[in-house]
Structure formats: structure tokens, C-alpha cells
């Protein structure tokens, strides 16, 4: 139990700086920038999936949390959010490096995730623009930066306090939530056991990516650790590992349900993420990656 508590605290503290900086930026956008600047930010979102994919590739689940909060405040597009989720690998990179895996193999894995993440992000944003082509006013309403609703959810009364105070209030609120969720998941993983989870994927060529993608959805850095270790022990194929890592967005998904009030939209995002991860893994398995 002590190890579970220790791991929970360590994992949560890693994300703390990302949370605070993200909320500080969001508060600044909401209270200091004029409408022209906000419009410029929204327009720059067309390149969001490219930037999000590159940023997400760095080995930190904090980026997925930051992207989630920015999406909840409608600062970034859905395509950008999905791009970050797909490219985020949590603990994969440090584990592969510590196990002296060939740099060529590591670069290949990261490149595949990056390409899938960026393409998926652009495609999603393109489809959304097509769907709302004849509903321009509705689109603008949905794209409107609405960071103020995060204040309502967090009961922090941003208007009456300073930017620093509001950002700190949001950070503490979400940080406590992350600790609780991480603790519960760590307990479940401990009692279920990594070995039992790996048995679900053993020697399953097509079903492997499907199950690995499901495991990747666990909102905890433990998912990437389990999947990467199973690959290193030859329990699963590289395709199944990539499939699971594509859906592994760390605690980003947990924060999504906490900060984004549209539950149906959240479920759709999870569905999109899972579909892309599973299909990508199956395709990679078929072509022999």
C-alpha cells in the first residue's frame, strides 16, 4: 500500500507544473487578450494537429493534461487534442532507452505514432469543418473561447480575483482529482496484476491491437508501462504496442471528463481515440510492421 501511495504521489506531482502553467496561460487569454487576439488564436488552430503532434511526442503525460484543459476552454481544436493524445507515450520512451533498445527501433515507433497523430488530427478538423460548412454561426459559437465555464465548474470566481490566484485555484482543484483517480487505478492494477493483463494479449495477432487499445485507455501512466514492458518481453508485437500507446493519453482522459461538461462529446472523443488506435494496430499487424 505504501508503494501504491508513493507511486500515486510521484505520478501526480510530475503533472503539477504543466497544470499550473496551462491554467496561467488560459487565465491570461481570458482576461487580458482582446477579441482580435482570441480570433488569431482560433485561426492558428488550423495548424494545431501538427504542433500538437510534435509536442505530444515528448515523454510526459502532462502535455495531454494541458491539451485537455485547453480544449475544454476551446483554445485548441478537437483535431489538435486527438493529435496530442495519439502521439503521447508517457513512460514508453524512458523505458525503451533504459532497456538499451536500438535507436532505430525507437525512432521508427515514435515516427509511426507522430505520423498517425498528425494525419488523424488534420482529418478530424477537416471533417468537422465540412460538417459545419453550412452552419457557420453554430461553428463559431462552438469554437468560441469559453474558458469562463471552467471557473464555474471550479467555483473559483475568476472575475473577482487575480490571474495568479485563479490559476492556482484551478490547479489545486484538478490536482486533487488526479491524485484520487491515479490512486484508484494503481490499486486496481496492483490487484489485477500485470501478468493477468498480458495473458489477454498473448499470441493474438488481430485481437491483440483491439485489446491493447482498450488497455491504453486506462487513464494512468501505468498503461504505457505495462504495454511497453510486454513488448520488451515479447508478449505482444510492435503493432499491438503501438496500438495501445496510441490510445494511452495518461490521465488526460480522466481530466477531460472532469473539465469538459459535454459528456456525450467526451464519449465520442474516447470512441474516436479507440477506433484510431485499434484500426492502426490491425493495419500495422497486417502489413508486418
Image (cartoon, rainbow, N blue to C red):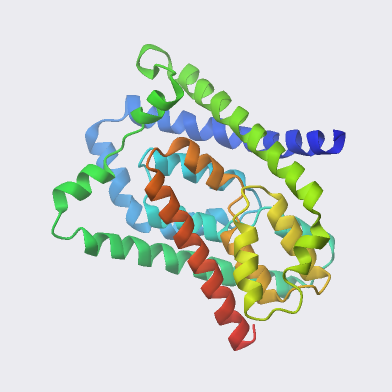
Q: Looking at the image, is 63 positioned above or below residue 271?
A: above
Left or right of 104? Residue 145 is left
Q: Residue at x 21, y 46 (%)?
A: 140
Seen from this angle, which residue lies furthest bottom? Answer: 287
Q: Residue at x 81, y 54 (%)?
A: 193
Where residue 196 appears, x then y in whole percent? 80, 61
Q: Looking at the image, is 198 positioned above or below residue 90?
A: below
Left or right of 227? Residue 44 is left
Where residue 58 appears, x then y in whole percent? 62, 54
Where residue 4 appears, x then y in whole percent? 81, 38
Q: Quadrant of residue 93?
A: bottom right
> Could you tell me which quadrant the N terminus lies in?
top right
Q: Looking at the image, is 286 positioned above or below residue 90?
A: below
State the count of labels.
Answer: 0
Q: Quadrant of residue 147?
A: top left
> Could you tell me which quadrant the C terminus lies in?
bottom right
Q: Nearer the viewer, residue 217 or 136?
A: 217
Q: Residue at x 49, y 67 (%)?
A: 275
Q: Residue at x 59, y 80 (%)?
A: 284
Q: Nearer the viewer, residue 165 or 239?
A: 239
Viewer can see residue 264: yes
Left or right of 109? Residue 9 is right
Q: Quadrant of residue 269?
A: bottom left
Viewer can see residue 97: no
Where residue 255 appears, x then y in whole percent? 53, 40
Left or right of 61? Residue 78 is left
Q: Nearer the viewer, residue 55 or 236?
A: 236
Amino acid at each position: 500500500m505504501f508503494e501504491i501511495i508513493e507511486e500515486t504521489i510521484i505520478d501526480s506531482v510530475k503533472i503539477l507544473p504543466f497544470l499550473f502553467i496551462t491554467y496561467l496561460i488560459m487565465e491570461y487569454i481570458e482576461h487580458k487578450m482582446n477579441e482580435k487576439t482570441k480570433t488569431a488564436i482560433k485561426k492558428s488552430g488550423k495548424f494545431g494537429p501538427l504542433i500538437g503532434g510534435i509536442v505530444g511526442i515528448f515523454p510526459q503525460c502532462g502535455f495531454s493534461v494541458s491539451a485537455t484543459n485547453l480544449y475544454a476552454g476551446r483554445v485548441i481544436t478537437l483535431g489538435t487534442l486527438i493529435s496530442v493524445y495519439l502521439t503521447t507515450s508517457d513512460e514508453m520512451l524512458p523505458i525503451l532507452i533504459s532497456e538499451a533498445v536500438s535507436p532505430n527501433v525507437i525512432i521508427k515507433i515514435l515516427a509511426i505514432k507522430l505520423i498517425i497523430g498528425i494525419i488523424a488530427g488534420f482529418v478530424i478538423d477537416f471533417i468537422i469543418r465540412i460538417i459545419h460548412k453550412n452552419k457557420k454561426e453554430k461553428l463559431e459559437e462552438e469554437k468560441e473561447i469559453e474558458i469562463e465555464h471552467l471557473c464555474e465548474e471550479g467555483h473559483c470566481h475568476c472575475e473577482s480575483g487575480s490571474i495568479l490566484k485563479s490559476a492556482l485555484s484551478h490547479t489545486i482543484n484538478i490536482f486533487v482529482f488526479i491524485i484520487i483517480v491515479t490512486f484508484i487505478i494503481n490499486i486496481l492494477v496492483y490487484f489485477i496484476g500485470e501478468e493477468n493483463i498480458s495473458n489477454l494479449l498473448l499470441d493474438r495477432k488481430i485481437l491483440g491491437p483491439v485489446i491493447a487499445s482498450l488497455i491504453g485507455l486506462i487513464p494512468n501512466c501505468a498503461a504505457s508501462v505495462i504495454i511497453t514492458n510486454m513488448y520488451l518481453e515479447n508478449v505482444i508485437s510492435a503493432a499491438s504496442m503501438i496500438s495501445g500507446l496510441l490510445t494511452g493519453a495518461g490521465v488526460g482522459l480522466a481530466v477531460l471528463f472532469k473539465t469538459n461538461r459535454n459528456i456525450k462529446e467526451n464519449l465520442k472523443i474516447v470512441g474516436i481515440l479507440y477506433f484510431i488506435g485499434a484500426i492502426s494496430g490491425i493495419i500495422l499487424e497486417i502489413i508486418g510492421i
